[in-house]
Image (tube, helix red, strand yellow):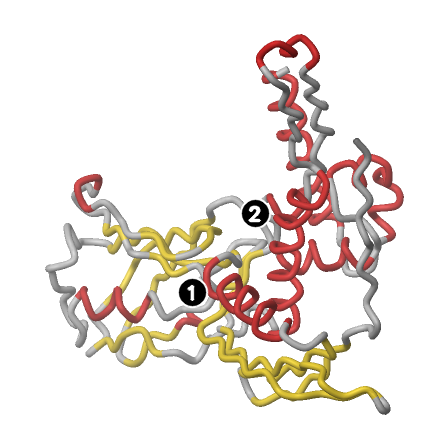
């Protein structure tokens, strides 16, 4: 039996208008057909808040401090207050692997996030944020912070903690608040359309527009599975079991968003038409090096990620 499916064609191409306001951006997206505003808006809001990757501190080691209930001589804040301030540091990472950030400060005076020494591939965005206060010249604060790349909110297991190691609950999401509303829209004489107004606040490591595009990519990947890659089974009666037909599921494209790559890198590659692992292999090193906003370190990270993925494929084959 042949099934004929009507193909839905968009009457209008949706566009995005941007209104900036400090760390908040208002995005007006549309037009959409009537009724789709809330459908699209709610899905994007939930994805923005829960599924975008970011960087956060997961472990803290403070010189001379065995646990978070200790104190540091000459430090105005207690260790718990210091850790809470550390959680407010905003990092921007260009690599997916964990990195160690260090601090060695002496008093008197304020200790700020900008005093942290960061390795290549990571930077502090809110450098003026005060972490602690040292009372005199004899006061010293020396510590190491482990910064990781992840998604969502991770609660630590305190049972895995060791003496001298403070585990930190990590909020990786770069998007802090999202609100949306659906407004009526029109194109020429055509009325009764929807447009979505997104009010998105981020931590500054990503713009609202970048976040919206990345969230759209996440949803697009999942909807692609429903669109054409579902395994279809034709069911027959028991006396016709030998005629059962099970079409083979075609290989699913592996999108770059599935890996913990920096947002800037995936956006730059997407602009160049490179969205999947297969696209990377077809492009080759020479074309990757010519992509705008993709430097040598990004190319190295991408080739390492591709190599690890292909090795895993070979082992599972």
Give percent across and percent down for residue 219.
61, 55
Q: Residue at x 44, y 72 (%)?
A: 176
Q: Quadrant of the C terminus?
A: top right
Q: Quadrant of residue 21?
A: bottom right
**Circle 2 sits on which residue?**
260
In screen coordinates, is 74 left or right of 90? left
Give percent across and percent down for residue 157.
23, 45
Q: Residue at x 64, y 26 (%)?
A: 233
Q: Quadrant of the N terminus?
A: top right
- Seen in the picture, residue 181 relative to 248 is either above or below; the reply is below
Category of crowding for the residue at label 1, using alpha-carbon neighbours closer than 10 angstroms: few (below 14), some (14–19), many (at least 20): some
Give percent across and percent down for residue 281.
81, 35
Front-most of residues 6 and 175 = 6
Q: Residue at x 53, y 80 (%)?
A: 180
In screen coordinates, is 1 left or right of 286? left
**Front disc: 1 or 2:** 2
Front-most of residues 103 and 153 = 153
In screen coordinates, is 260 left or right of 145? right
Q: Earlier in the sequence, mark 1 or mark 2?
A: 1
Q: Secondary structure at mark 1?
A: loop
Q: Residue at x 43, y 59 (%)?
A: 172
Query: Contact (CB < 8 A) between labels 1 and 2?
Result: no
Q: Secondary structure at mark 2?
A: loop
Category of crowding for the residue at label 2, using alpha-carbon neighbours closer than 10 angstroms: few (below 14), some (14–19), many (at least 20): some
- On residue 116, the disc is 1
In screen coordinates, is 75 left or right of 227? left
- Seen in the picture, residue 196 relative to 227 is either above or below; the reply is below
Front-most of residues 204 and 9 = 9
Structural distance between the alpha carbons of marks 1 and 2: 24 Å
């Amino acid at each position: 039996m042949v099934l004929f499916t009507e193909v839905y064609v968009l009457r209008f191409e949706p566009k995005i208008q941007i209104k900036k306001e400090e760390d908040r951006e208002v995005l007006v997206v549309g037009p959409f057909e009537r009724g789709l505003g809330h459908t699209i808006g709610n899905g994007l809001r939930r994805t923005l808040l829960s599924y975008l990757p970011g960087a956060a501190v997961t472990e803290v080691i403070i010189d001379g401090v065995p646990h978070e209930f200790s104190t540091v001589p000459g430090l105005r804040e207690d260790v718990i207050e210091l850790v809470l301030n550390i959680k407010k540091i905003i990092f921007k990472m260009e690599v997916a692997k964990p990195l160690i950030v260090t601090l060695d400060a002496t008093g008197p005076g304020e200790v700020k996030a900008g005093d942290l020494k960061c390795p290549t591939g990571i930077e502090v965005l809110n450098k003026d944020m005060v972490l602690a206060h040292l009372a005199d010249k004899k006061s010293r604060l020396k510590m190491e912070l482990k910064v990781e790349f992840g998604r969502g909110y991770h609660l630590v297991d305190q049972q895995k903690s060791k003496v001298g190691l403070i585990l930190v609950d990590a909020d990786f999401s770069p998007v802090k608040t999202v609100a949306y509303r659906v407004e009526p829209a029109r194109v020429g004489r055509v009325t009764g359309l929807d447009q979505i107004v997104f009010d998105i606040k981020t931590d500054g490591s990503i713009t609202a527009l970048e976040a919206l595009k990345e969230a759209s990519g996440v949803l697009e990947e999942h909807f692609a599975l429903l669109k054409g890659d579902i395994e279809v089974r034709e069911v027959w009666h028991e006396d016709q079991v030998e005629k059962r037909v099970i079409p083979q599921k075609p290989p699913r494209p592996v999108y770059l968003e599935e890996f913990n790559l920096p947002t800037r890198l995936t956006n730059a590659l997407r602009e160049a038409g490179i969205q999947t692992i297969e696209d990377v292999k077809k492009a080759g090193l020479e074309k990757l090096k010519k992509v705008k906003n993709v430097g040598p370190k990004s190319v190295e990270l991408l080739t390492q990620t591709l190599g690890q993925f292909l090795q895993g494929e070979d082992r599972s084959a």
